[in-house]
Image (cartoon, grey):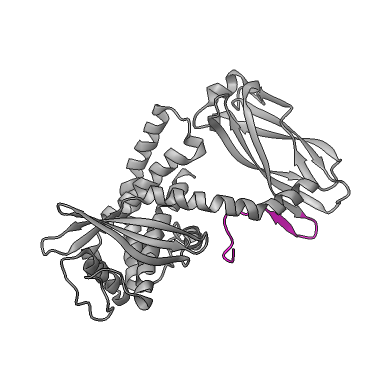
Amino acid sequence: MKGTLIFLPVLCGSILLFSTTFAIAQAQQTSTINKADAISDQKNITCNSKTENYSLGLILQSLKDHDVETFNRYVNTGSVLSSIFDDYFEFTIEKENYNSRRSDSDIAKDKQLEESYNPIIVPKLEDYLAHYVETGSFSTKDKILAPFVNDLKKSTDLGYLEFKKIALVTQKNNTAYVDISLFDKLVNKKFTITLEMQQLEDGTWNLLKISNLKNFIDECRKAKKPILAELNQPIIDKINQDVSIGSPFETKIVYISKLTSGPILEVHLPISVNTENNDLRFLLGHIDIENSTGKLLIASGFCVGLKDQNSSFTHTLTFPLDNMIFGKKEVEADPSALKFKISVTSLTYLNGDELSIAKDLPENS
């Protein structure tokens, strides 16, 4: 499970690299980059070959020509993809709630995991990137990558990024930082991507990494949150009319058999249902279980059948503690001290209709 979670952000970063390049390429068809030595002709690049813009133009041309050799000369794919992998992994550790209050030991284990996955995953991503350059297609027959590709196109706002300008180019010795201003039409906001490039012996430039990737992702997420919250509020109101879940009235540790299984945390949830609506079939929900300091110990989805239920009933969730990566001792020590965040994420009705809280912005938002 953890391995597939890692694939998602890494591929997401790869698509981000593609979408940034697409945005620049699209802009060249409709506007001129506001820089004296900018690339002004897609078919015949005749600007100063010592500039970063010239090398970006060669990268664009290699994509149009499906020229893998030229692309690899001006894009250090190993460096770009490896840095994307590391940045996304670190972003998860720094920003995701389940890591927000982890110990130094836990974070060190994550770092070891990152280092062990990097040499396995990055070559696969290099093959995927080469396939894209050669064919111009995001599709893949790889059984691991294929399930994620369509979701990744949406999650990185591919198709909604619009090039504005090369905002700034700064150089330090043989390293250049190219700030590219993009406009995300989905959230109606400007963002800046910074490309780090290194000068080659012939004076042209090689793309090394997206140096502000973590910050870009964070800003994108923050921009989407209020829009998503506004879109979801009517759905949440409708769900609350039909069903509600109260705070757990009992949490305890039980043993089905000390010989055959370890300790199990039982969480008893009080659920109220609008019995006037007899079309309810089941609900899907999510529960976060934290310790007294707010450290996330367990995050899990759950399903509750609603057909023929009374207006008020109890549903019991069970969590085998031996499956926990960390925090087992804290849960066993005092289950009554645990804190809970519980939400209903969707309702399904007997006629097949479904009312679900959106996780991402719709394409027509």
Task: Quadrant for residue 58, please give it.
Answer: bottom left
Residue 107, image x, y percentages: 40, 33
Tell me which residue sits at (37%, 63%) in the image.
Answer: 20
Q: Position of residue 101 (x, y in %)?
A: 48, 30
Residue 140 drawn above or below residue 117: below
Overall secondary structure of the magenta section: loop
- Image-quadrant location for residue 105: top left
Which quadrant does the C terminus fall into? bottom right
Where is residue 47 shown, x and y percent of the image? 19, 74
Outermost residue on the right side: it is 276
Above or below for 332 versus 284:
above
The residue positioned 31% from the left and 65% from the top of the image is: 130
Nearer to us in this view, 11 or 322: 11
Is 235 left or right of 169, judged from the image as shown? right
Residue 144 in picture, x, y percent from top left: 45, 56
Q: Is residue 221 left or right of residue 22?
A: right
Q: Residue furthest left?
A: 201
Q: Which residues are magenta?
A: 349-365
Residue 356 within the segment the image draws in magenta: yes
**Is residue 112 highlighted in magenta?**
no
Q: Is residue 211 visible?
A: yes
Residue 333 in the image: above or below residue 24: above
